Structure formats: structure tokens, C-alpha cells
Amino acid sequence: MWRAFLDRLPTKTALIRWNIHVESNLCVWCEDKEETTDHILTGCNFSAGVWHSISTWFRIPKVFVFSIVDLVVLHKLCAASGHRKMLLQGIFVIASWRIWRARNEKVFRARIRVWSTLLRTLRRRVSCGINIDLNMKL
Ligand SMILES: [Zn+2]
């Protein structure tokens, strides 16, 4: 997450900025926008689907994020108790990592994931890891 926050992820746009040749700087998912850290993690329909589903999962108002900075502070703005805020912060970090990982799987292995599958996997692993019903009020 710190690499994303510092804009140090090797996105296509970053690679071009670092004088590394890439065929195209367009997003691997939408192929419509420039692939930047902010676009991959917040602006693309793929990531927006993840954030909106997390909103539904945690029964919080729909999450709209426009930059990595929004992701870092988002848990503070959610109407939730202390433990729930910490849990949301962790979920946002893990989801960001999994979005980046899904991007890399598409680029390097031509493996296409849909955001709903990513979220289902995230939800299952988080539920197992903390062994609580995440729908309950914390
Ligand atoms: Zn995109």
C-alpha cells in the first residue's frame, strides 16, 4: 500500500515514465483510460465494483474513491465503531493488494478475473481469518 501511496507501483504509465518500453499505456481491464495507480485501484470499473461491493458487505454508504489518498483515509470517514473502522481499514488495504494482484495476473498470465470473484475470495478469507460473522455489528 505504501508503494501505491507513493505512486511507485509499476503501472504502464509509470514504466513509460521510467523509460521502459510498453506496447500501450491503456488499462488492462477497460482499455479506455491510462493505466495509473489511481485508475487501477480506484477509477476503473473493475475496482469500483470491488469498492461498491465492500460497501454492501459492511452495510455502509456506497464507497466512492477517486485516488489512493481516498483509500488511505476512507475508514476514518465511515460511520462505524473503533473495531469496525480498523477492520474496514484492513479490508481496504487487502482489497487494494488483491486488485493489484489481479491486474498482474492479467498482464503476466493472461488470467482474467472478474471483480465479483475477487471479492468472494476476499470475503471468504477474511471471514475464516478472523472467525467472526462480518455482518454482525461490532
Ligand atoms: Zn480501467
Image (spheres, grey):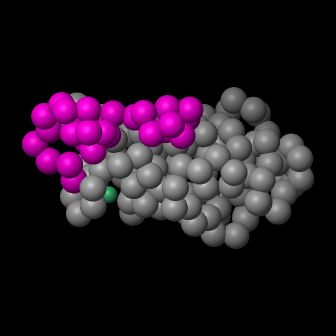
Residue at 30% in and 39% down: 14
Residue at 61% in and 64% down: 63
User: Is there any visible trace of residue 103 in the rendered image?
Assistant: yes
Residue at 22% in and 53% down: 26
Which quarter of the figure is the N terminus placed in? top right
Residue at 43% in and 60% down: 43
Q: Position of residue 115 (x, y in %)?
A: 42, 53
Q: Nearer the viewer, residue 34 or 93?
A: 34
Magenta residues (range): 1-26
**Is 97 on the left-hand or right-hand side of 62?**
left
Q: Nearer the viewer, residue 113 or 132?
A: 113
5 in magenta: yes
User: Is there any visible trace of residue 116 in the rendered image?
Assistant: no
- 47 in relation to 105, above or below: below
Residue 60, image quadrant: bottom right
Residue 61, image quadrant: bottom right
